[in-house]
Amino acid sequence: AQSVTQLGSHVSVSEGALVLLRCNYSSSVPPYLFWYVQYPNQGLQLLLKYTSAATLVKGINGFEAEFKKSETSFHLTKPSAHMSDAAEYFCAVSDNTGFQKLVFGTGTRLLVSP
Amino acid sequence: DSGVTQTPKHLITATGQRVTLRCSPRSGDLSVYWYQQSLDQGLQFLIQYYNGEERAKGNILERFSAQQFPDLHSELNLSSLELGDSALYFCASQGGGKGEQYFGPGTRLTVT
């Protein structure tokens, strides 16, 4: 079975500050890992994915994440927060055998203050 | 815009009723997934179809059923609705085998 743990249901940062959203996964097989963002009253938008190529993955809107197998982590970072980054962020895992369901974490709401 | 469409956007209905949610995947995507998002359960996988065939089932109630048609659109049928079925229902489609799924805007179901 696979699972994802997102530490911190809410993270607050100031505009221009570093964003760090934590994700730890559990998987009995090599995983695919994803970060999705959800803006209010919208669907989920794929930010970035890890599919066993480079361990440092760059996504849209300046976000990146690093896959660390030894730490079973896939934390999401952005060097400088923007007001428009305020949203809910979900980490998800699937196994690497192709067409498989996503297992989501509980989400982290990012609040950005001016 | 993900290319996945869902109708309707909002649905308000009474307990005991039956509703149908519709999803059209991205052009060419063969696999469709249904997820439920609620405050207490978070995002939960319900069911997956691949090219018209049911592929996997998750935490889907017996009152719920789904199908995928030859044109690849999918429908999720929810019957004998209860207050606790109120949630956002998302459809996602997948084309390649690298795991990434593209989500529709969702249908917000309110059961009164």
Image: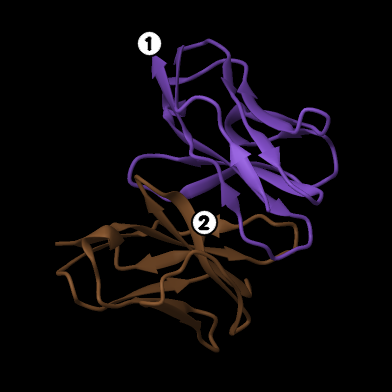
* Chain letter for the residue marked with disc 1 in the picture: A
Instruction: Look at 48% across and 37% down and name the residue there.
Output: A107
Instruction: Look at 45% across and 79% down and name the residue there.
Output: B66
Residue A41: % across, % down: 33, 46
Tell me the distance, in whole angstroms, between the alpha carbons under discs 1 and 2.
Answer: 30 Å
Q: Quadrant of the C terminus of chain B?
A: bottom left
Question: For the residues tagged 1 and 2, is the chain the same?
Answer: no
The residue most toward the bottom is: B70
Instruction: Look at 51% across and 18% down and name the residue there.
Output: A81
Residue A1: % across, % down: 68, 53
For residue B32, which quarter of the picture?
bottom right
**Tag 1: residue type?**
Pro
Q: Quick one: SS at disc 2?
A: loop
Q: Colour of chain B?
A: brown
Tell me: A31 left or right of B34: right
Asked if marks 1 and 2 touch (Cβ < 8 Å), the reply is: no
Q: Quick one: SS at disc 1?
A: loop
* Chain letter for the residue marked with disc 2 in the picture: B
Tell me: B81 left or right of B41: left
Instruction: Look at 70% across and 66% down and name the residue there.
Output: A99
Q: Front-most of B30 and B26? A: B30
Few, some or many residues within 10 Å of mark 2 (<14, 14–19, 20+): some
**Tag 2: residue type?**
Ser
Residue topped by disc 1: A114
Residue A44: % across, % down: 48, 48
Q: Colour of chain A?
A: purple
Residue topped by disc 2: B2
